[in-house]
Image (cartoon, grey):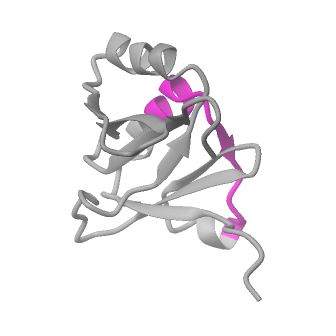
Amino acid sequence: MITALDHVQLSAPPGSEDALRAFYAGVLGLTELPKPPALAARGGCWFGSGPVQLHLGVEADFRPARKAHPGLRVTAIDAFATRLTTHAIPVTWDDNLPGHRRFYADDPVGNRLEFLESVTGSP
């Protein structure tokens, strides 16, 4: 029986860890999580906030995820969007999901991310 989602992994090109840390920790406010030593040797980095974990793994033949993406729930979505645009990260609003406000943005290596907030009374 599946009980929870442990993490989502996205790919990144070799040598992109500093840019990923600046974005995921510096801009998004996630905490960098220690990787087990055997996995740390492979490169990449892990981030989390509460029960949410994003793992960024190095892939030599990297191509950014454009359709597949994590959907990250946020509070105060307008302030969160402003936080990204203040760092020169474009956001694209999408009003096609009933009961939610959401936008998309790309991480520094081009992976698509969705940020969403439920409208009052919606799950």
> Percent from the top left, x then y, of residue 68?
33, 63
Kindly give the residue lying farthest to the front in the view shown.
121
On screen, residue 67 versus residue 44, left or right, reads: left
Residue 97 figure quarter: top left
Task: Give the magenta part as a residue range.
Answer: 21-37
Q: What residue sits 29% from the left and 24% below the top?
A: 89
Q: What residue sits 56% from the left and 66% below the top?
A: 41
On screen, residue 66 versus residue 10, left or right, reads: left
Quarter holding the N terminus is bottom right
Residue situated in front as seen by the camera: 112 or 102: 102
Against 103, residue 98 (above or below) is below
7 in magenta = no
Against 14, residue 93 (above or below) is above
Residue 65 figure quarter: bottom left
Q: What residue sits 64% from the left and 54% below the top?
A: 53
Residue situated in front as seen by the camera: 110 or 76: 76
> Percent from the top left, x then y, of residue 23?
44, 32
On screen, residue 82 versus residue 31, left or right, reads: left
Residue situated in front as seen by the camera: 43 or 20: 20
